[in-house]
Amino acid sequence: MSVYTVKRITGTPDYKNLPVFEIKNFYKTDNYKPVTKGILILREDAGFEITMWSLEANPRAIYHNPNDLIHTDSCMEAFINFYPEMPELGYLNVEMNVNAASKVSFGTGRHTRNDVVKRNLPHPAVFAEKLEIDGSPAWRVKTIIKFELIQALYGRSDFSKGHSMRANFYKCGDQTDLPHWGTWSPIGGLDFHSPEYFGNLVID
């Protein structure tokens, strides 16, 4: 099972010295497996910051609005269950494209979830940019899942050292020129909404 250590950060993060996860498991994709990595940190002043980047020169980016069909664009995603000891509540999914558009919803599975805005909760803001990484064209997204949102969804927002969460991270592009589906933690079939295959996140 995949395991990632979530560092607790006070002040400005030093991103060069943080653990990195990588999406290496691709499904139904023989000829296109873009290098995609990310960082998840616990910012004591805000919440959980997710940063992901992918080495893609021309990512498909059709959608611009919250909760559009982001997964059909070139997309990076984080699905996180912050309190797996309460399985009746579920996990948060955040799907992001290079237009800084995102879909954010919450529930126990694909068919038992709804967008956070439908719960009258704020939709997390996303920052996105195109850049070069080691001389290669790339794009990067960043968002913060604030403690206030976690509190509203789970009824708590306490995260002590050793706290274990469950998650998976994805790279996909359902309607891109080169459709692809990649995961951090391996899955049993091509369904990202498979929490039984989530890996472990442990707070340092």
Image (spheres, grey):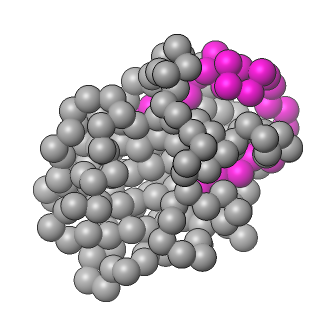
Residue 83 percent across, percent down from the top left: 78, 39
Q: Quadrant of the N terminus?
A: bottom right
Residue 28 percent across, percent down from the top left: 37, 80
Question: Residue at position x 66%, y 65% from top?
Answer: 197
- Answer above or below: position of 101 versus 152: below
Nearer-the-camera pick, 22 or 77: 77
In the figure, is residue 82 to the left or right of 23?
Answer: right
Q: How many marks?
A: 0
Q: Is residue 124 visible?
A: yes
Is 152 inside the magenta-drawn segment? yes
Question: Residue at position x 27%, y 76% from top?
Answer: 32
Nearer-the-camera pick, 69 or 133: 69
Residue 199 percent across, percent down from the top left: 68, 61
Residue 18 percent across, percent down from the top left: 58, 47
Nearer-the-camera pick, 182 or 2: 182
In the figure, is residue 143 to the left or right of 3?
Answer: left
Nearer-the-camera pick, 63 or 145: 63
Is 103 inside the magenta-drawn segment? no
Q: Is residue 135 visible?
A: no
Question: Residue at position x 19%, y 62% from top?
Answer: 176
Residue found farthest to the front: 111
> Where does the magenta region start and end?
141-168
- Answer above or below: position of 83 versus 17: above
Q: Quadrant of the C terminus?
A: top right
**Residue 151: which quarter of the image?**
top right
- Answer above or below: position of 116 versus 45: below
In the figure, is residue 58 to the left or right of 21?
Answer: left
